[in-house]
Amino acid sequence: MKTFVTIAIIILVFVALKNKPGAETAWIRINQLGYLPNGAKVAVWCSKGEKGISYWELVDAGNNKVVYKGTAGKNFGAYGPFQQTHRLNFSAFKKTGKYYLKTGNTVSPVFTIGEDVYKGTADFCLRYMRQQRSGFNPFLKDSCHTQDGYTLYGAAAGLPDSTYIDVSGGWHDASDYLQYSTTSANATYHLLMAYRDFPTVFTDEKLANGLDGKNNLPDVLDEAKWGLNWLLKMHPRDDWMFNQLGDDRDHISMRIPKMDSQYGRGFQRPVYFINGEKQQRGKFLNNTTGTSSTAAKFASAFALGFELFGKIDRDYSNELAIKSSTSFAYSSKNKGVTQTASVKAPYIYAEDNWKDDVELAHIQIYNSQENNLENYRSISITAHPTPPSKELVNASYKYAIQEPITPWLGADTANHYQWYPFINLGHYELAKQLKDSRRDTIIGFYKEGINRVWSKAKQNAFYRGVPFIWCSNNLTVSFAMQCYWYGQLTNDQQFAELEQANIDWLFGCNPWGTSMVYGLPAWGDTPVDPHSAFTHLKNYPIDGGLIDGPVYTNIFKSLIGLKLYQPDEYEQFQSELAVYHDDYGDYSTNEPTMDGTASLIYLLAAMEAQSKPKK
């Protein structure tokens, strides 16, 4: 424990000295993880002065010799707190080693160019997922929320309010202990995808319960199964499905998870039934219009789970196939979106789209049937048979063209989780299967979305085109994934530098010069005072947690209950555009999220896999 405190103090002192107002007027921002030898390699020089630069040098950190020189190129001018900015592109330099960039008196931190700069990063972020577990928590080596929960809104389905149902398990959503089906299903799907696409990246160092040990299953699949098992509890019968566990009454205090008694039913928490109708949002009602958005996410996660567990646990895999089918049917009960509920505050996940979820459900069920056909044919699914495979593909395309572009792409703002997931997962799965002109159409949707962001990003040196809305880092991860998938589908690398710019942003190439992932890299400037009970109350590290990220300054000023508890070490980098605070009191920019971290695990696995030699 004392070690964690000492490390935190050292980092705080280092950051405070480094960012002391007036000490510097120019900085070079880098990806602190480092750069792949054959990848895009760009840093950003930024200054509060009136003049730009004309040249820069890449220096070997071992002998201080200049190994590469470049001209500064375009001066992008003002951005955020800076008056002058340049992109320093050294992609042509491919020799591995440790280096720093220099121009005039401005020197960057030392960084690595190497094949292994992303090695182990996806597994590192799995630490945060395990720490978020409800039920048995392996980090705490204790259990919490074991008496969940009592039902609400399920009377029409034979569940009078306050009926007990066992839904213990799953993941806490963020630094609070609410649990949402929509984010949990999406997180589960991302973890399953990460293993499907990059199986050699992940190790086996943990047991299924998250404790140390090996169980002949990659840890990412252990974690995905933890998510699947909770989703099974949240869909216990064909005609029952639940959308969330707990509500904003959770925010009564910061505490280490154990038992919550603020809901008026002992240690039970409310579990909200999906009835396709509007439910409470503070003093008002949310805008729920149907059952599709959440139920379709269940169907996709169960379907991919069926495929991947087919050769590991046949009985479990078959159960997932059946639940995928019943979830698929549930998504059609009342076509529309399911939003979350709140009791006191107006803040909810105000999801407004559902056709992307249904698109993915159709094509993922098709993929899973085709890839696990022998198992699928052995299962008796009589209650809710899925359409024949060809119909699934055609239906997926029908929904794809109804939401061709994820609406936040290119927009300046959006409501909280309004367009969720932040990437159209179905487009990628569908494009991989289509062989006719429809494939080009789907890929064109991805390209158009990227270009909408690029039209904004190309105007600033950070290539920042993602809006600074709440959870902007989640959007950043998703956008980088979309660029990556576009490249995979087309072999067109025109957006490779833009993709890398979004990854670099997450690890320090941003106005604040900090990583947005707790503890990654261990030697870098990363969050030390996040909005988390684990760190704030116990000084426990929350390794691998992706924090929300910067928000527009006007959003920060408008939110309820925000208060900074420490002097702002990034004060000189705040601006009228956006703010970020490494401060426990800022839940809008510095709170880690479970689903954002799960998406990041996929992206980091992709980056690590790029560095592995092709077999």
Image (cartoon, helix red, strand yellow):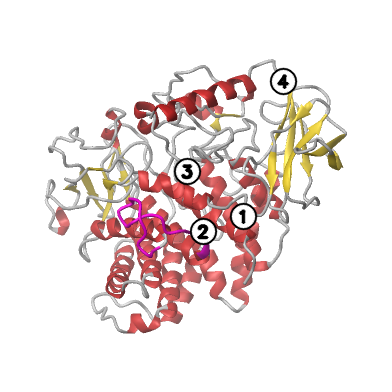
- Image-based side of 38 in relation to 394, left or right: right
- Which contiguous range is marked in magenta? 200-217
Query: Local crowd at mark 3 within 10 Å, few (<14), some, or many (≥20)?
Result: many
Query: Local crowd at mark 1 within 10 Å, few (<14), some, or many (≥20)?
Result: many
Counting residues from the N terminus, which is met first, the one under dot 2 or under dot 4? 4
The answer to the question of whether label 4 and label 1 lie on touching residues, with beta carbons closer than 8 A, is no
Residue under circle 2?
Answer: 424
Q: In which quarter of the image is the C terminus?
A: bottom right
Q: Where is residue 181 in the image (x, y as percent from the top left)?
A: 33, 52
Residue under circle 4?
Answer: 24
Counting residues from the N terminus, which is met first, the one under dot 3 or under dot 4? 4
Q: Residue drawn 21% across and 36% down?
A: 260
Residue under circle 3?
Answer: 544
Query: Distance of mark 4 from mark 1, alpha carbons?
Result: 38 Å
Counting residues from the N terminus, which is met first, the one under dot 2 or under dot 3? 2
Q: Nearer the observer, disc 4 or disc 1?
A: 4
Q: Nearer the observer, disc 2 or disc 3?
A: 3
The answer to the question of whether label 2 and label 1 lie on touching residues, with beta carbons closer than 8 A, is yes
Query: Distance of mark 2 from mark 3, alpha carbons?
Result: 24 Å
Q: What element carries label 4?
A: loop
Q: How many marks?
A: 4
Q: What residue type is labelled 3?
A: Gly
Q: Is mark 3 on a helix, strand or loop?
A: loop
Q: Which amino acid does label 4 sit on?
A: Glu
Q: Where is residue 157 in the image (x, y as percent from the top left)?
A: 16, 58
Query: Local crowd at mark 4 within 10 Å, few (<14), some, or many (≥20)?
Result: few
Q: Which amino acid does label 1 sit on?
A: Gly
